[in-house]
Image (cartoon, rainbow, N blue to C red):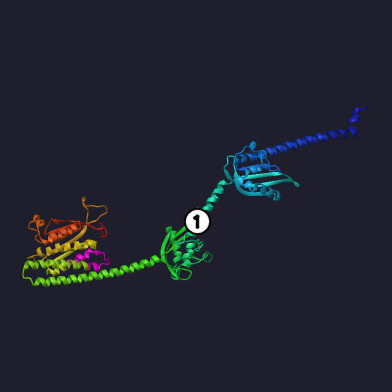
Amino acid sequence: MDYTADRHSPEVLFLQGSILTPEQQLKECQQDRDAARDRAEELQRFLDGVQEYAFISLDPNTTIVRWSQGAQHLFGYKETDVLGQQGSLLFTPEDRAARADWQECETAKRTGSAEDERWHVRQDGTRFWASGVLTAHREGDRLQGFSKVLRDLTDRKLADDRLRASEEQLRLFSENVQDYALVPVDVRGFVSGWNTGAERTFGYSPEEIVGQPVSRFFLEEDVERGAPERDLQQSLVQGRNEEERWMVRKDGTRFWARWVTTPMYDNHHELRGFAKVLRDETGKKRAEEQLMASLQERDLLLREIHHRVKNNLNVIASLISLQAAQVPDESLQQMFSELQDRVRAVASLHKAIYQSPNIGRIPFGSYLESVLHDLVNFHQVGSERILVHVESEDVVLSVEQAFPLGLLVNELASNALKHAFAGRSGGSLTVTMRQVPATADTARPGQKHCEITVQDDGPGLANPDDFWQSRSMGLRIARLLTEQLEGTLALRDGAGTGISLQFPLAADGAMGGADC
């Protein structure tokens, strides 16, 4: 029998094909399994390489069957710790008690997936906020299991919470500040916000005013002059703008307002609007006006008092003159004359007070010219014969210093007019007042010192050393007034007689043009 021929028979060929087909199928199936395993391993490597996300697989009973490296990084559990555990392990005790894990699975079964954000618990008990998606996997109608992807969003959650807390604090701050109107304005000049204080101040509700131009708060005449726009523009130029003016409420009444406008910029320094903080200061304005009116009335009253005192002193000086005329004794007449000088000097000071723009501060330079002119006339020394010079910086003295200084100058000038020009056909009397440096033993921090000098061009003192030994009333008065001024008297060297006084200027005094 020829078996070779039999191997090529149809029967043999069919039998060989039937044997080879299962072998080929087994080989192809193995190749498919290897390819699937490779893809699964590649996917697992990908999932394990993504540390920011947790990839978790669960069976239909929500038992954990796969646990990525990202899940281990996020929860702290190793894969061997959680495989076979229930997926509820990922939830907080309170969420498990509320059956949040069961509700999540039911939602995924019903809709295909369930997405939420919630707190989760790590192995060490700490919590983190995560966004997660649970997806249900089906083959036909049969549930194959679930996959869950989570990402740690704790930093974002905490930042959002801080932002919300900050916004809530700002809202509460704005709503509870009732004494100030806090008004945000957009870049076009329209009101974009309104707090309780603003509603109380202007009378508008938020629904009535938000979106309206800020010019609605201004008086019509101020709007015509461009005050609202100028306010915003000045704040951009200067960084802030502060103003006071009359403004108008919803009911048309006016109130005096003080406010600050500040531009608001974002992180890119782009202008986002303006912040206006405003306060109703009508009561303060009225009080200031009443106080000013009261001060003006007081000022007028004091001026009238000083005027009347000056007139009365002049009457007294005239009575002294009449009395002196009745006394035959020349020494008594001299005493009356000196007393009259002093009374007239005080009268001139009262005149300077009520003529001063500020009743509490006397421009002493003009007073010197006035009192010396009166002295020359009183002593009947012709002004064409005696030249009187006053050289004074712009000195303003308090009343407390002006009175003793005026009396002292009167004493020194009177003495010069009586003694320096006797038997002479002419001469000069000079009074100077200037800044001088403080001496080391009298200087106080920030205190100014001044010097006033009365100088004549007469023959001078016969014996200057005996001058301070004199027991005359004039010198005694001069010394008492010098002590009152906390100053020092000194004789000046040179021709004629010169006596100078140095004294510290009181805190409310000033010398123009000099840092005295």
| In the depicted structure, whether residue 11 falls above or below residue 493 | above
Q: Quadrant of the N terminus?
A: top right
Q: Quadrant of the C terminus?
A: bottom left
Please, what secondary structure does the residue beneath circle 1 have? helix
Would you say 196 lies left or right of 478 here?
Answer: right
Residue at 13% x, 66% y: name it.
Answer: 339
Residue that lies at the very extreme toward the right in this rendered image: 1
Residue at 66% x, 44% y: name it.
Answer: 148
Check if residue 366 falls in the magenta segment: yes
**10 Å neighbourhood of mark 1: few (<14), some, or many (≥20)?**
few
Place of residue 344 in the rendered image (x, y in percent of width and height, measured from the top left)? 17, 68
Place of residue 485 in the rendered image (x, y in percent of width and height, measured from the top left)? 20, 58
Three-letter residue code for mark 1: Leu
Q: Which residue does the numbered mark 1 point to in the structure image?
A: 170
Q: Residue 152 falls in which quadrant of the image?
A: top right
Would you say 310 lies left or right of 226 here?
Answer: left
Q: Residue 128 falls in which quadrant of the image?
A: top right
Q: Which residues are magenta?
A: 351-373
Residue at 6% x, 68% y: name it.
Answer: 330
Instruction: Say whether residue 457 is visible.
Output: no
Place of residue 94 in the rendered image (x, y in percent of width and height, measured from the top left)? 61, 47
